[in-house]
Image (spheres, coloured by chain):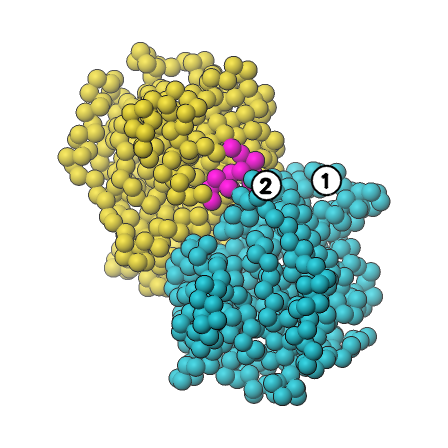
Chain colours: A yellow, B cyan
Amino acid sequence: MEPRKILLNEDEMPRQWYNILADIKINPPLGPDGTPLTPETLAPVFPMNLIEQEVSTDRWIDIPEPVLEVLAIWRPAPLVRARSLEKALGTPARIYYKNESLSPPGSHKPNTAVPQVYYNKVFGIERMTTETGAGQWGSALSFACAQFGMQCKVYMVRISFDQKPYRKAMMETWGGQCVASPSTETRAGREALERDPDTPGSLGIAISEAIEAAVADETGKTRYSLGSVLNHVMLHQTIIGLEAKRQFEKIGEYPDIIIGCAGGGSNFAGLAFPFVLDKINGKDIDIIPVEPAACPTLTKAPFVYDHGDTARYTPLLPMHSLGHAFIPPPIHTGGLRYHGMAPTVSQIVTEGIATPKAVTQIQALEAGVLAARTEGIIPAPETTHALACVVSEALKAKAEGKEKVIVFSWSGHGLLDLTAYEKFLSGQLTNYVLTDEEIERSERIFENFPKPTLLKSR
Amino acid sequence: MEPRKILLNEDEMPRQWYNILADIKINPPLGPDGTPLTPETLAPVFPMNLIEQEVSTDRWIDIPEPVLEVLAIWRPAPLVRARSLEKALGTPARIYYKNESLSPPGSHKPNTAVPQVYYNKVFGIERMTTETGAGQWGSALSFACAQFGMQCKVYMVRISFDQKPYRKAMMETWGGQCVASPSTETRAGREALERDPDTPGSLGIAISEAIEAAVADETGKTRYSLGSVLNHVMLHQTIIGLEAKRQFEKIGEYPDIIIGCAGGGSNFAGLAFPFVLDKINGKDIDIIPVEPAACPTLTKAPFVYDHGDTARYTPLLPMHSLGHAFIPPPIHTGGLRYHGMAPTVSQIVTEGIATPKAVTQIQALEAGVLAARTEGIIPAPETTHALACVVSEALKAKAEGKEKVIVFSWSGHGLLDLTAYEKFLSGQLTNYVLTDEEIERSERIFENFPKPTLLKSR
């Protein structure tokens, strides 16, 4: 019997994260006045040890022992050979995936929630605030806070809060607190409710609320946490790709194509960045972030300076963005409904190191159902976007008769997002594809913003 | 860093199941006329290869290669040292658990769903029917049927069907069909609806429907599948305990106390039976099945001959039973709401090899929340019953200053049963404890049934 899974023992877990900022340059974040931010400006929002990580250009950063101990609840994650999927597709390609669905909250998100909570804890912080869309990130942060005995407050986009009561119960089981956003607890929330008392909310508004709640705590013991986009978040996620490289070494294999779904970019970056290093050093590989056609940041939106949130509390970040006021169509993929994209991911796309693709939610769910029936795990709606691309690359390899090695990140399971499958299977799923006109309209918001420079890393 | 998990590689998976019928005697199943059943009588319901397994007394039975290949999607399951829970309890006990929550459906159930579907497939069957209460078993069978390209029809107890639409979506994603029971598709269903059009349904009625649907298929290509109670189901689950024994050998440890939750008995049996063999051979260990005080089959109900279903389609089985007409109180633990108990589990309790305990659902959920906040995984409501007993044994060890080694089965995660936690955390959970009077009343149903003999295995 050929093994399905390539396993690592706990003592084979990577002891350092890979920091892509040692190998690529990005435009600096800018303050409200358009000048580069100093780290100190961020101190009311994040603890200084994480800010230092955010701006570090060291290539390797040690993973603290207490972080490794918590990650070991589910890590190292198996690298799985998807033989049943290969067989169903009749492809000569060898398909592998990192199974990130095995964490207690069911996704890759705790890879950064755990170190973020740890660094806050050692900095003397007692309470964390954050936002959540579909609920994956809020669940992950609540889980991590329970591990370190920290308080956790989550602002959850109202439409998801109402549709997914299970997510709230999950966070509360771990001791977190969860309120619908916009709430009446913050100025940003109250203003949003004044504008529209029936608003479904948005990630942009929820981020504003969570930042405000952190900054407003006069004891100074509260900080904010973001689950994607920022450099230190990408850094923490590289444990996925670093493990994968060790696992490929064990079986004497190396991937030709690396695929990950991309909303804010952290899942994609986690798998891809350690391979980007190899590509910069000359390896001939394809690196593909996959996004929804309904929110096509990388494939359609311009590379600009934009805010990460609706109320414009965050600095200006250099990124592919549909505009901080953009509200994505109601696709069943909460984790990919974000107007922007991580600066580091935007940068490697700008440089042509990664080549993004967009898929519709029906293409994605089709691949998701095939994957569930072959590989067994029901993928998160986010993961199905990566799967749609995997299927198309595997069929291309079949048409060309090539033995390509494909690896992708199975970012999470879909057991708390089964409505997407229900709608798809009953033929009630709608496709949303953003038109060029809609994109042009959303772009006008940047007219008076500074423009990032086109940097070239090598 | 001390490792959390004791892992096995796929090539270390057990290649044989342990059959407890080589080491204990049980009363034979009886037909409607009160005489022992011949295997042939069961042929319309189960395929002959599984019936042979049901009556086998061979101690070791080979696990077929194609079954191992599917089990390898998530097995071997880690044996985890619950250091965080130990620390929270301040106990000198060393607590370990088998993590059965990592299977794609999220519980131990696929350990038997996979071989059952495989044996049906090689026997030429094309379609399986079954019942499900909370949904764990129906999900597991749908998952397994997808792996072998079989059709699957699940009769789901109406109250759960209405409360948990996600479960239906899950089964359908794997290609299964799921209808609410009682349905109008079967005579048993129609009769139940005539008696009470608004009935919430019961496991007993759903079993009757599923058996009837299998037997009624005139092509002979449909068979029924049961997720617990029967000997071959217990057999398949022993992979849990066999793996655990190998893992304990690796670290030079051996448990003093073995704990599992018990509804029909398969999760408990899966972990415990391989250790029962050692106990019969002289090992001094405590073996504890834990059941809900609301459905106290082992701790309160008599050892009798009873039917497994309400419509009395099943043979008479020797078991601890509250009566086939008994409808358990609406506790949040669908998997433990069953009137009977596996004959093999009933037998070892009758002989004093295992000593059952009952806990209330509030005790259980209290332990479940503690476990979620320390070990990280949100336990299935079923698992929380085992956890309540683990906590009490660990505190006893603390009071006595003894370094007991405790192992239990973490039978599944609770991500599809979070309502139980929501109710508990908001103080809305009610305790149900069955009174002696209620039990006496339910016992009258056995008055005219044959009585099992008190057998002694050694």
Three-letter amino acid code at disc 1?
A: Leu
Residue B345, image quadrant? bottom right
What element does badge 2 sit on?
loop
Residue at image location 47% in from the left, 44% down from the top: A166
Main secondary structure along the magenta-highlighted residues? helix
What element does badge 1 sit on?
helix
Nearest the eye: B69 or A402: B69
Number of marks in the rendered image: 2
Residue B199, image x and y in percent?
A: 48, 64
In the image, farthest residue toward the left = A437
Residue B189, image quadrant? bottom left
Residue A26, image x and y in percent?
A: 34, 24
Residue at image location 28% in from the left, 36% down from the top: A328
Residue B330, image x and y in percent?
A: 57, 56
**Can I make out residue A382 in this image?**
yes
Residue at image location 51% in from the left, 42% down from the top: A170
Chain at numbered mark 1: B
Task: Judge whether A222 appears above or below A385 on screen.
Answer: above
Nearest the eye: B5 or A10: B5
Residue B275, image x and y in percent?
A: 73, 63
- Label 1 and label 2 in one chain: yes
First of labels 1, 2 by sequence position:
1
Instruction: Give the class, few, some or many, for how many residues have Cα within 10 Å of label 1's Cα (few <14, many ≥20).
Output: some
Asked if the magenta segment contains residue B435, the reply would be no
Three-letter amino acid code at disc 2?
A: Gly
Chain at numbered mark 2: B
Which segment did they paint magenta? A166-177
Task: Return the mark for residue B427.
Answer: 2
Q: Is B288 on the left-hand or right-hand side of A130?
A: right
Residue bearing the label numbered 1: B89
